[in-house]
Amino acid sequence: MEKATSLYRDVLGATVSDKVPLPEHGVYTVFVELGNTKLELLHPLGEKSPIAGFLQKNKAGGMHHICIEVDNINAAITDLKAKNIRTLSAEPRIGAHGKPVMFLHPKDCDGVLVELEEA
Amino acid sequence: MEKATSLYRDVLGATVSDKVPLPEHGVYTVFVELGNTKLELLHPLGEKSPIAGFLQKNKAGGMHHICIEVDNINAAITDLKAKNIRTLSAEPRIGAHGKPVMFLHPKDCDGVLVELEEA
C-alpha cells in the first residue's frame, strides 16, 4: 500500500487521501483523487480480509473491482435482479464513504467484480 | 463485447459509443461514458492482438488496464524514466482518441498496467 500510494502521489503527482482502516470490510483504503473518479488502493486488514485470496492469486497486486455510483441502490438492485444479475450479498452494506454499497457477481459482469454505491 | 456492451447500456443504463475497430492496436473498442471517466470495452482484432494472451488467461474476461490523462506525455515520460518507471515501448503511439499514449510496466505499477494519454 505504501508503494502504491507513493506511485500515485510522488511519481504521478495525484492527490491522495490518508490511509483509513475499515475493519468491517477487512481492508485499509487510500483514495487517489482523479476529478470525479477515484482509485481506491486496498490493503488487507485482519485475518479474514476479503482481499486476501485475491493477493494470493496476484502476488504483485492488480485490479480488484470497479465501483459505479447509482442514485438509489435498492431500486438498482430490484432492477438488476429482474435482469438476472446476481449480487454477492442479500442486502447492501455500508461502504468506505458511509453510503450503501452492493457487489455484483463477476460471472454476470463479464469477469469483472462491479460494486454499486449509492451517490 | 456484445454481452459487455449490453450490460452497461441495457442493464446499467449508461451511454455507450459505437464499436470502433483500431487495427493498429489490434482491438475493437466500445466506450462507456461515466461523466469525465470512460470504461473501455475491448475485443481482439486480428491474429496478433495484444489482448489475446490476457483473454487466454482470463477466459471470462476481466480488467485489463487503467488510463490516466496527462497534460504533456513527453514531459511525463521523461519524469517517469528519472523515477525508474519503465515503459512498454520506446516512443508513444497514437491511441483510441487520436492522442499520444504510452503504457507503463505493470511491475513498476503494483501489478497494474497503467496507460498515460495526453489530454
Image: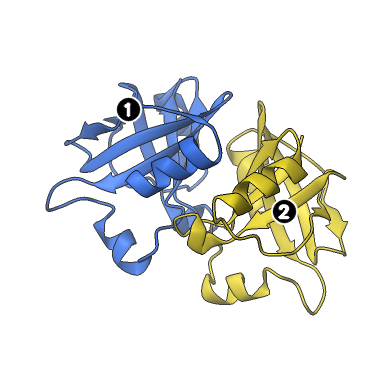
Chain colours: A yellow, B blue
Instruction: Give residue B40's position: percent from left, percent from top.
Output: 42, 38
Observer-nearest of A38 and A116: A116
| Chain at tag 1 | B
- B5 vs B70: above or below: below
Question: Residue at the spot x=67%, y=74% of the render?
Answer: A52
- Residue A59 versus residue B63 in the image, above or below: below
**Quick one: SS at disc 1?**
loop
Residue A87 bears which disc, if any? none
Q: What residue is shown at x 47% (from left), y 35% (from top)?
A: B9
Q: Is residue A1 visible?
A: no
Q: Is residue A97 above or below residue A71?
A: below
For residue A102, which numbered disc appears in the image? 2
Q: Nearer the viewer, residue A75 or A8?
A: A75
Query: Which residue type carries mark 1?
Result: Asp
Residue designated by label 1 = B18
Where residue B66 appears, as percent x and y from the top left, is 48, 43
Instruction: Name the residue: 72% across, 53% down.
Output: A102
* Residue furthest front as drawn: A82
Q: Residue reaching furthest bottom?
A: A47
Location of residue A10 (image quadrant): top right
- What's the distance in space between the residues labelled 2 and 1, CA to CA? 29 Å
Dot 1 alpha-carbon crowd within 10 angstroms: few under 14, some 14 to 19, many 20 or more:
few
Coordinates of residue A43 in the picture (x, y in percent): 72, 62
Q: Of the residues shown, which amino acid type is indicated by label 2?
A: Met
In the image: residue A50, left or right of residue B52: right
